[in-house]
Amino acid sequence: MEKQKRFILPENEIPTQWYNIVADMKNKPLPMLNPQTKQPIKLEELTGLFSRACSEQELNQTDAWFEIPEQVRDLYKSYRSTPLVRAYGLEKALDTPAHIYFKNESVSPVGSHKLNSALAQAYYCKQEGVTNITTETGAGQWGAALSYAAKAFGLELAVFMVKVSYNQKPYRRSIMQTFGAQVIASPSMSTKAGRQIITESPNYQGSLGTAISEAVELAMQTPNCKYVLGSVLNHVTLHQTVIGLEAEKQMAMAGEYPDMVIACFGGGSNFGGLSFPFMRHNLVDGKKTVFLAAEPASCPKLTRGIFQYDFGDEAGYTPLLPMFTLGHNFAPAHIHAGGLRYHGAGSIVSQLIKDGMMKGVDIPQLESFQAASLFAQTEGIIPAPESAHAIAATIREAKKCKEEGVKKTILFNLSGHGLIDMTAYDQYLAGDLTNYELPDEIIKENVSKLDKIV
């Protein structure tokens, strides 16, 4: 008789705190730097851009736990806990001895994990008396989440959406506008950074780095306005640890513990959100769980980038971050996993990969859609193109288990559904999608332009 398939926590078991992994790391991430002085950034410098609470969380390296504000937790209760699901159908199709579980973050009101941090950041801005916020978005999941959160806390929001996704994914744009946000295709003529890029490259279809530059510039020029970020930085991943903290309890309900934890990787928020609570047991308790970050082969910063200080945006407005990077001028291929088209990795994941405690794997675009289709056919959920990279990496590992005759427990994050990404599936089914391999010379040219601080 099969075990239970879905595991959901009762309301009183939803986490009351977020987990700050930096407190338990032996080798702390290098500090972010002021780009002018090249000195570690100060709290007062960060608060010019972010809310004070998020700035304090960003720089904190000593406190392992942060209380989730009551108002945020009350909003979490509308969709949390999210289900932990045993993927029996996928296991059967692969004929694998592996036990495969996925954390289903697609059940949030906006269809992805992004709401976990959007609600927190909007709350902190509101508490500070902020009236306007700006942000960027790639495929639109973050923009949709922040649009919902901004409306929940009475904030005005401007979203710079990467132009290729603005055109590829019109319904995500519509979702943001339905929630009351202003959505601008990036690069745009509404900022100095955007105008410069359009002047130099009139047909440029944008990148997350470009959209961040525009959002930061607008925030700095608008009274009573803060910039809100959807990934990469420490405080964003902190808020996402609610995913892994729930999954810990749910895996215990299932009577198992993961040998492997896998998630897709753009800047690191959903990957860190699931993996950091389990990595804590590697750091503190000597567990040996393996952590795999699945990135697109067309944007391989973890496997082919360099560890170096770099800007988080294209125009150079942000602090310098210690990261695995392809260079902030990197122009990504127009793959459909728009949320993963980012040049760099968050500093915590970068340090853990540098220390050999996590690793990245590259997934070609066609393999990700093949995996997504199999998952949809066996589990009944059409995944976001981003999440499909985690599914593809999971399938690889499950097949290895069959080949080697080894049973492993694999946990991956289904970070969002793909019901608004059906144009991408149409193109895949029609045979119009291709793989793109990033040439070495482009990486070398980009990273050669960086100041060699590390």
Image (cartoon, rainbow, N blue to C red):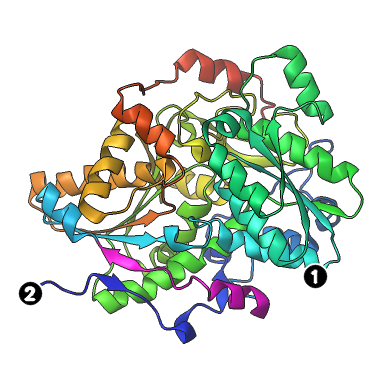
Asked whether residue 193 appears in the rendered view, the answer is: yes
Q: Residue furthest bottom?
A: 12
> Would you identify the image quadrant in which residue 366 lies?
top left
Task: Check disc 1: other Cα within 10 Å, few if <14, some if 14-19, many if 20+.
Answer: few
Mark 2: which secondary structure?
Answer: loop
Residue 50, position in %: x, y? 77, 54
Is residue 226 left or right of 347 when viewed as pictured?
A: right
Is residue 159 left or right of 141 when viewed as pictured?
A: right
Say which amino acid is labelled 2: Met
Region of the chain picked out in magenta, as a range: 70-86
Q: Residue at x 53, y 25 (%)?
A: 332
Is residue 301 left or right of 199 when viewed as pictured?
A: left
Asked whether residue 364 appears in the rendered view, the answer is: no
Q: Residue at x 36, y 24 (%)?
A: 433
Q: Which residue is mark 1?
A: 127
Could you say which is closer to the camera, residue 396 or residue 9?
Answer: 9
- In the rendered image, the vertical position of residue 406 relative to residue 120, given as above or below: above
In the image, which disc is placed on residue 1? 2
Q: Residue furthest right?
A: 223
Residue 75, position in %: x, y? 60, 73
**Is residue 131 located in the magenta-colored stretch of the structure?**
no
Quarter of the picture holding the N terminus: bottom left
> Would you identify the image quadrant in which residue 244 lies?
bottom left
Say which amino acid is labelled 1: Gln
